[in-house]
Amino acid sequence: MAGGAGTRFWPRSRVKKPKQYLSLFGHQSLIQESVQRFANFIPEESIYVVSARSQKEVLEEQTNNLPKENLIYEPVGKNTLPAIGLAALFIAEKDTEGILIVSPSDHLIQNDELFQQTIESALLIAEKKDGIVTIGITPKHPATGYGYVKTAEEVKIGQVIKSFAVSRFVEKPNVELATSYLKEGGYFWNSGIFIFKVSVFLESVQEYAPELYADLMRIKEHIGADSYEEALDRIYKEVKSISIDYGILEKAGNVFLVQGDFVWNDLGSWEEVYKYAQKDENQNSTTGEVIMHDTKNSYVYAPDSLVAVVGLDDVIVVQEGDTILVCRRDRAEDIKEIVGEITRRKLDQYL
């Protein structure tokens, strides 16, 4: 899934080139790293991307190793359930019993070998149990920015990684509630990675989101025909925006979780990027011609100009073209408010 806007990564993230297309930790963008991670054990012809039509140019440029027909475009964003449903239609044309691994394209994942073992364990459960499987990240601290998954009994069918039946999905908690989850145990962060048979998924959509299912079946009639683009535009704009969590996972009974112990972060802000970036002896991370004087614990990205920071600690500075962001690290979440203000002022050239 590669259709997100990534407003918290302004000014680098823009409408036509949001977070997933940015190189944050090396030469490859997040989506390129994601494709490569799966290409280690899945043929490239079996890797599909769902994105926004407005991102078509940058997506094709950054995924030129994938078949063009594997790039699926939404005319308008409708959250995760319709996006996955649209992809499922294309997979079903080839194999109704094929297994989908659904993954965001803009997360940080490290330890590819353990990640592969985790996915393969999930594939086994999806195949043997006809289940909907999610990867749950073992929580390291009482985070309030993630949804949680409460597990029940352990499931053992020969998989390598620990797996459980799912008791319930929990919305993002406050810090007191999150702390109690960690003390109680059996709770995992919701990674947004899901595994299931195409047939199981479509049956679940039919049962729990029948209006969406009806719309998808109308679109399905046009796949491969000259009428596809027109029909997609006409039908998809009427589709209800809904997440897979709310639309299916919170209602279904055949949901399982595989324990994820690889390094994972959904990179929700520049603060998260700072945490994983390489740093010098003063805990500063810099890109470009940067001069730091009496400055510690800061992140500066300025590839196109000289930036000097004097006497400031715990700051984020990002220069991109004709825009500059300066903020305290503990206020990185508020960058979305700046994007909102730019929108209100109709300064679209900066979006």
Image (spheres, rainbow, N blue to C red):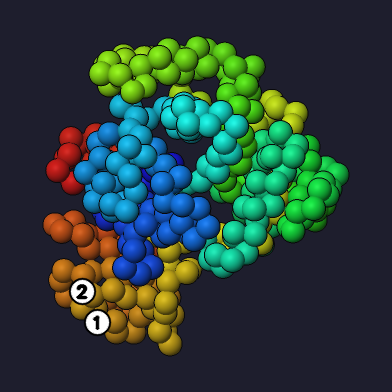
Expressed as whole percent of the image width and height from the top left, the position of residue 158 reads: 79, 53
Assess whether mark 1 and mark 2 are in contact (beta carbons under 8 angstroms).
yes
Q: Is residue 94 above or below residue 113?
A: above
Q: Which residue is mark 2?
A: 307
Identified at 42% across, 77% down, the residue is 278
Q: Is residue 230 above or below residue 31?
A: above
From the viewer's perspective, is residue 110 above or below residue 170? below
Quarter that holds the N terminus: top left
- What secondary structure is found at the residue carrying circle 1? strand
Q: Residue furthest right?
A: 153
Position of residue 188 in the picture relative to residue 332 (left or right): right
Indicate which disc residue 134 carries.
none
Residue visible at 34% across and 30% down in the picture: 74
Q: Quadrant of the C terminus?
A: top left
Identify the mark at residue 291; answer none if there is no mark. 1
Q: Secondary structure at mark 2?
A: strand
